[in-house]
């Protein structure tokens, strides 16, 4: 009887683990859908008009149109990477930065997203993104990773901030197109 209970328990654990794992979209490269997405770790919020956007771990993108009382998860996010920041020009047009040097874009008020840029080989997160207008923006991150677009993200080009061996982490970007950078010559 004990052996039968062991086999039944083992089968039950394997079956429930498989059933739970199938809800997380492993292997699809798309963010998992969950009614509890708004309870996950959210790394950044952006308010534009009446809409609040949130981005976080495992590719979670959520939005609210009622000051955060209720949240809706984006229908399609083609990554499971941690997302770090969001910048919106309008409620319809937004960009997200994330790990693996990922940049996502939405032109339908955050319902669906597509990858505009990704560099899995570089293996560094983009930590912040800021769009100045529909065409011009920058994204910055670890190991002095910095990218710039002048065409709405159709292409992202490297901005080289320094040629020396010191590769600082660039954590946050904001401001207008006249923004400037200050750095130390003695590594801090």
Image (cartoon, rainbow, N blue to C red):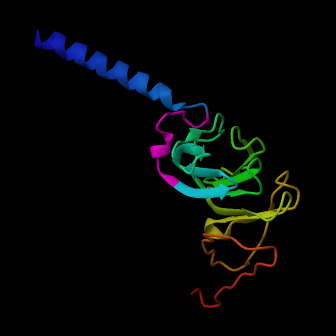
x 53%, y 49%: residue: 68
Q: Going by the picture, which residue comes out furthest to the right?
A: 151
The quadrant in which residue 99 appears is bottom right
User: What is the quadrant of the N terminus in the image?
Assistant: top left
In the image, taking residue 151 as reference, residue 167 lies left or right, namely left
Q: Is residue 32 above or below residue 95?
A: above
Q: Going by the picture, which residue comes out furthest to the left?
A: 1
x 87%, y 61%: residue: 150
Image coordinates of residue 100 in percent, x first then y, are 63, 52
Can residue 147 be seen? yes
Image coordinates of residue 182 in percent, x first then y, are 69, 85
Q: Is residue 61 above or below residue 187?
A: above
Question: Does 144 lie within the magenta span?
Answer: no
Q: Is residue 170 above or below residue 151?
A: below
- State the predominant SS element of the stretch in magenta: loop
The quadrant in which residue 7 appears is top left
Front-most of residues 2 and 91? 91
Question: Does 38 lie within the magenta span?
Answer: yes
Can residue 122 be seen? no
Q: Is residue 49 above or below residue 106?
A: below
Q: Which residues are magenta?
A: 29-42
Front-most of residues 153 and 3? 153
User: What is the quadrant of the C terminus in the image?
Assistant: bottom right
Image coordinates of residue 108 in percent, x first then y, are 76, 41
x 52%, y 42%: residue: 70
In the image, taking residue 123 as reference, residue 2 lies left or right, namely left
x 24%, y 13%: residue: 8
Total numbered badges shown on the rendered structure: 0
């Amino acid at each position: 009887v004990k052996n039968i209970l062991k086999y039944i328990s083992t089968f039950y654990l394997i079956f429930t683990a498989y059933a739970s794992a199938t809800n997380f979209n492993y292997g699809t490269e798309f963010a998992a859908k969950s009614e509890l997405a708004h309870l996950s770790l959210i790394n950044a919020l952006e308010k534009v008009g009446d809409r609040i956007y949130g981005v976080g771990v495992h590719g979670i993108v959520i939005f609210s149109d009622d000051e955060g009382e209720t949240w809706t998860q984006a229908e399609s996010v083609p990554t499971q990477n941690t997302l770090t920041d969001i910048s919106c020009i309008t409620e319809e047009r937004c960009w997200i930065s994330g790990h693996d040097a990922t940049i996502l874009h939405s032109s339908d008020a955050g319902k669906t997203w597509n990858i505009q840029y990704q560099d899995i080989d570089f293996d560094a997160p983009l930590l912040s993104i800021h769009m100045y207008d529909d065409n011009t923006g920058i994204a910055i991150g670890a190991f002095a990773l910095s990218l710039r677009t002048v065409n709405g993200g159709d292409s992202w080009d490297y901005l080289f901030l320094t040629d020396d061996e010191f590769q600082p982490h660039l954590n946050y970007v904001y401001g207008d197109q006249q923004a400037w950078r200050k750095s130390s010559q003695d590594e801090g």
